[in-house]
Image (spheres, rainbow, N blue to C red):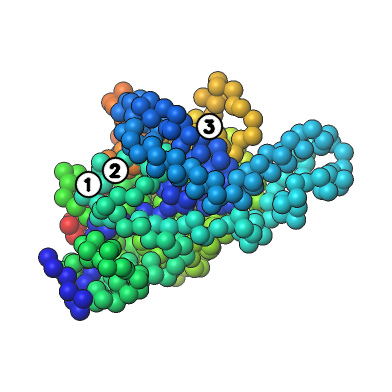
Amino acid sequence: MNINNDDLVYIKSNLVIEPLIDNWYAWPHIVSPATAAMNIKTRHLKIMKSYVQNPKIHAAAVKNPKMLGGPFIDYGGKRVDEIKALIAKTTTDCAALLELNDEILELNELLKNSAKGYSMNDLYSKIPENLQGLVELVYDINDNPSFRFFEALLYETEYYNEAIQSFNLFLVIDDDSRSFVLSTPKLPSPEILRVEMPFKSKEIDLLFEMARAPKTYKEIAEIFNITSEDDPLFRTFFTTEAPKPYNKYDGDGVLTRYFGHACILTETKDTTILVDPLVSYGYESDISRFSYEDLPETIDYVLITHNHQDHILFETLLRLRNKIKHVVVPKSGGGSLQDPSLKLMFEKLGFENVIEIGEMEVLRFDDCSITGLPFIGEHCDLDVRSKICHSVEFKDGYKILFAADSCNVAPQLYQRIQKIIGNIDVIFLGMECHGAPLSWLYGPIIPNAIQRDMDESRRLAGCNFEQARALVDVFMPKNVFVYAMGMEPWLKYISSIKYTSESEPIVQSNMLIDYCLEKGIVPERLFGEKIIEYNDSETIPILAETNH
């Protein structure tokens, strides 16, 4: 289809915005300055240097299913000179961040060697120069020394550099076959348009408003300053065909739809809530799924459960930012390295009306309320506070719990909570009970080598059967939906999970499903898409009718 300059055009439903920081796929730990510094130095540069030294080893590892999600670059052993050039560019463009990494490690050593339980007042003058005025030195009650960042100030320094932010625009033909993105930098490709622009840019919103509100091609091309060289590719991102209209829910109950992984859309006739947005694209597939076309024109509240890359996906969030009214995030621990503030992060990325919710705090709206319930475990025993389970209660008392990956290692916790909030009608519960070890996610920010057996024992794991059963027993739900398992093939590029019938999460969740059936509870392990409608005190799973 030929697109003329004066044609009113919409973006195609399979247009991807792939956010990048220093040419790597952007996820939360490379946005926050301190964790970005340590990931760029210890993860990115290390992977690239390894590739330059042994490209064939990387090429072989990428083809090995057992190595999925490992630190291997997926360029088939080729493009070595480009990776060499990227190493040099990173060393220059990220010089301040690389220095920050070194100074954080230096501060750790200072505290390790000099903070012995006595006053640390004299140590402030010995803090590395560039960190002075950015950290407070603290002990815990057992005299273990540490420090916390004044994170809002950290974002105002050279360490938060929007010049290394950019994004790719391209059409995805088959999301299910995208390669794992966290271990391979993004090099130029003929079918990809690189846009050098920070994530907060309003131009992104103007582009993705065109999912339903057309502009002339000339107008959007001028907004993005498209050159004659890039114009032929940019034109392919648009169509004159209007999208199918969205059928807004106008019933008196609650309509809940599963979009895959931990992404759930809940609607009443007045309010829309989207949890942990991660949405597939519109294209032909053997697996039925909802896509961006199946989202409402306005999302009143986006709820974030925790700060992991499969629950905060900027690729989805930036595309939806133009229609999001509020973002609800868990409160952080207040400046600890391993727990950056989500509120600060979202605000720096151009999101408005970002609301923090703490444990047992309640946000009340016209036709529902949201209670933040404690989220326990799943973070490798690190002191991470920015995690929350969202309990949403509607006017007639109908309650849905989005428990995400909370690992019920202390059943007494939810027993106490039940005495306060009562039972839950529907529980969405993650059971990826054999997650990656501590070093897979948090390795770059840990200053000392991790003993292998300790590393293997501390995992990014959700509930097993016994833990899930205890949660079900205490809240006595009518429906239990196992989700957040990373099962959908379109998640492979971000999660790298591949199950068999003998995989522990499948075995354990099967046990939970059998248990629920014995108890008269309606269970299901979700996959692909699902619609659940609640009306007149009854929850009814119904067949999906999508717009694609």
Q: Is residue 494 left or right of residue 347?
A: left
Task: Decide: few, some or many residues near mark 3? Use Cα within 10 Å; few <14, some 14-19, many ≥20.
Answer: some
Q: Callout 3: helix, strand or loop?
A: helix
CB within 8 Å, label 1 to label 2: yes
Q: Residue at x 35, y 39 (%)?
A: 79
Report x, y in % for residue 439: 53, 32
Q: Amino acid at mark 2?
A: Arg
Quadrant including the N terminus:
bottom left
Residue at 75% in and 56% down: 133
Q: Which numbered circle lies on residue 178?
A: 2
Query: 215 left or right of 184?
Result: left
Mark 1 or mark 3, which has the lower sequence index? Answer: 1
Residue type pointed to by label 3: Ser
Q: What is the distance, in whole Å, between disc 1 and disc 3 at their CAs? A: 31 Å
Q: Tell me the residue at 65%/52% (across/down).
A: 334
- The residue at which mark 1 appears reads as 174
Taking the view exactly as shown, the residue that stands out farthest to the bottom is 6
To which residue does mark 3 refer?
Answer: 439
Q: On the rendered structure, is 518 left or right of 161?
A: left
Q: Quadrant of residue 235?
A: bottom left
Residue 531 seen in the current view: no
